[in-house]
Image (cartoon, rainbow, N blue to C red):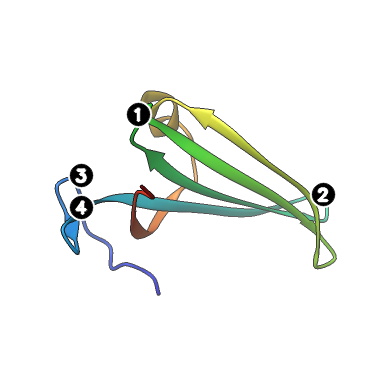
């Protein structure tokens, strides 16, 4: 379910755990759908971006890239969709 548009910060808590925003970017390029899911990691503090390339409904390529929070803030097209807790 999509989170209503509002400003979140890292001080939100769920079940006694700190939560982190999850972002999504979806676009079509040359017949392929590129879906990116981004989530903040605690240690080290950075953003993991999971990139899926889908062609004709089939997952063709998958990889994970890591960027700093500053680099992520400069990337276009990401929209916050939910929040998650860290896995410990």
Horizontal and vertical percent for residue 1? 40, 75
Name the N-terminal-most of marks 4 and 1.
4
Mark 3: which secondary structure?
loop
Instruction: Report whether 36 appears left or right of 71.
Output: right
The residue labelled by disc 4 is 7
Name the N-terminal-most of marks 3 and 2.
3
Mark 4 or 1: the one toward you: 1
> Mark 4: few, some, or many residues within 10 Å (few <14, many ≥20)?
few
Contact (CB < 8 A) between labels 4 and 2?
no
- Of residues 38 and 18, the one nearer the viewer is 18
> Mark 2: few, some, or many residues within 10 Å (few <14, many ≥20)?
few
Q: Picture quarter containing residue 55? A: bottom right
Name the N-terminal-most of marks 1 and 2.
2
Horizontal and vertical percent for residue 33? 72, 56
Most extreme residue toward the bottom is 1
For marks 3 and 4, give the CA distance.
10 Å
Query: Of the numbered discs in the image, which one, if any, rests on residue 10?
Result: 3
The residue labelled by disc 1 is 45
For marks 4 and 1, give the CA distance.
20 Å
- Of residues 80 and 12, the one nearer the viewer is 12
Q: How many marks?
A: 4
Mark 2: which secondary structure?
loop
The residue shown at (22%, 59%) is 6
Horizontal and vertical percent for residue 75? 48, 34
Mark 1 or 2: the one toward you: 1
For marks 1 and 3, give the CA distance.
12 Å
The residue shown at (43%, 45%) is 39
The residue labelled by disc 2 is 30
């Amino acid at each position: 379910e999509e989170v209503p548009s509002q400003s979140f910060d890292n001080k939100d808590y769920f079940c006694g755990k700190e939560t982190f925003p999850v972002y999504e970017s979806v676009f079509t390029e040359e017949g392929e759908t590129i879906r990116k899911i981004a989530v903040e990691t605690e240690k080290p503090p950075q953003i993991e971006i999971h990139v899926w390339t889908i062609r004709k409904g089939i997952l063709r390529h998958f990889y994970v890239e890591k960027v700093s929070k500053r680099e992520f803030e400069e990337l276009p097209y990401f929209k916050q969709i939910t929040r998650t807790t860290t896995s410990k």
